[in-house]
Amino acid sequence: MSQHRLYMGAPSPSGHFGDFGGRFVPEALMPACLELEVAFVDAWSDPEFVQEYRSVLHDFGGRPTPITYLARLSERIGVEVFAKREDLAHTGSHKINNVIGQTLLTRRMGKHRVIAETGAGQHGVATATAAARLGLECTVYMGELDTQRQALNVFRMELLGSKVVPVTSGSRTLKDAVNEAMREWVTCVEDTHYCLGSVMGPHPFPWMVREFQSIIGHEASEQLSERGVGVPDLVVACVGGGSNAAGVFAGFANTSARLVGVEAAGGAAVSNGSPGVLHGMKSMLIQDEHGQIEEAHSISAGLDYPGIGPEHSYLAAEGRAQYVGIGDEDVLDALQLLSQLEGIIPALESAHAVAWIVQEAGRDIPRGSTVLLNLSGRGDKDVAQVREILRGRS
C-alpha cells in the first residue's frame, strides 16, 4: 500500500497547485493562455493525438530510453544506482518529449510558427528540431552570456533553420530570455505559439509540460518492475524550472519512493527563496525583501534560473519532495567521476543530481538503497566549458 497520496494530479480550475501556480499575465495574453488550455485539454483526451505523440517520440525521438545500472559507481559509493537515460533521447536530453507535444499542438491549433526561450540550449535545439520536422518557423531567445557558454548549441539551432536572438538585457541568461519571449508572444499570438521549455509560467504550461514529460516516470516505473527492482528507495533529478524532475516524479508520486530535486546552490529557490510572482506564475523565487528578483548563479546555464516550477513549490510545501542545493565544484567532480567510472559524460545539469547522490551515499542515503537517477542530458554541449574551467584549476 502506498505511503503517499498522489500529489501530481491536475491543478485547480484556476491553475493552482495549492498556493502556487495561477495565471498572472497581461490582459493581451489571457486569450492565448485560455486558447492553449482548451486546445491541450481537447488534444490530451483525444486518443489519436496521444497516439501520434507517442509514435513520433518512438520513431523520431528515440523512446523508450533505457535504464542503465551504474555498476562501478554503485560499488564505489555503496548505493545501487540506476540511470534513466534521457541523454540518449534525440537531441541529447528530455526536452524533446515536451516540444514534440507542443509543436503537434501548435499545428493542431492552426498556427505556423513557434518561439522559445533557452538557457543551456537543449530546449532551443529540441524546439528547432521539432519545428524542422513539422515545417514550422522557429525563433529562439537565448541570453547573450549563454550564447557564449553554449556556442555549439547556437550553431545547431541555426543549422536546423531556426533564428537565434541573443538577449542583452539584465543578467543575459535564462530569466531574461523568458522575458523577451513573453514580450514577443504578446505581439503575435494569432499565428505563433510560445513553446515554453519547463514546468513554469502561466497555467496551463506547468501542467501541460509535466504531462508531456511524465512519459519519463511511467517508462522508468515499468522498466524497473521488469528488472525486478520494483519501487526504488529514492528518485533523484536536477531541478532548474523542473521539467525533467516533474516528469520522472510523476511515475513515482503515489509510491513509497522518496523524491529529491537537486538545485544549483547559487539559486536554490526552495531553500533560499520566498513566494512571489514571476513569468506568469506564483512560486518560490530568489528575491530581496522588496520583491525584486535576484540573479541566480550556476555553472550550468540550464539551472541558472531564480525560481522553480509551481508544482515543485507545492510538493516541497506538502513535504512530498525534498529539494537540496549542490555547488559548482562538487558538480565538476561528479561529472568527471561518472565519465571515468561509467563511460557516460553527463550534462552539467544532470551532474548536480549525480553529485548529491555521491555526497550523501552512506549518510542521507542509507547504504544498500536503490536510487533512480534521471540522467536528463548528455554533456557534449558542456565539454568546451568544462575543459576551460579544469585548465584554470591546474
Image: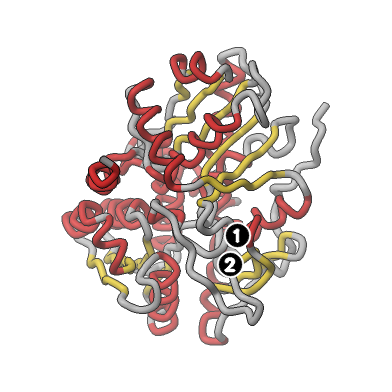
Q: Residues within 10 Å of mark 1 (few under 14, many from 20)?
A: many
The image quadrant of residue 66 is top left
**Dot 2 amino acid type:** Ile
Residue at x-position 33% and y-position 24%: 340
In the rendered image, the vertical position of residue 330 relative to residue 271, given as above or below: above
Going from N to C along the chain, the mark reached first, 2 or 1, is: 1
Residue at x-position 63% and y-position 40%: 260
In the rendered image, the vertical position of residue 356 relative to residue 313, given as above or below: above
Horizontal relation, residue 293 to residue 175: left or right: right
Of the pair 83 and 254, the residue shown nearer to us = 83
Q: Are marks 2 and 1 in contact (CB under 8 Å)?
A: yes
Q: Tell me how far mark 2 sits from mark 1, CA to CA.
A: 6 Å
Residue at x-position 46% and y-position 40%: 330
Q: Which residue is mark 2?
A: 286
Residue 41 seen anywhere in this rendered image of the structure: no
Residue at x-position 57% and y-position 17%: 78
Q: How many marks?
A: 2
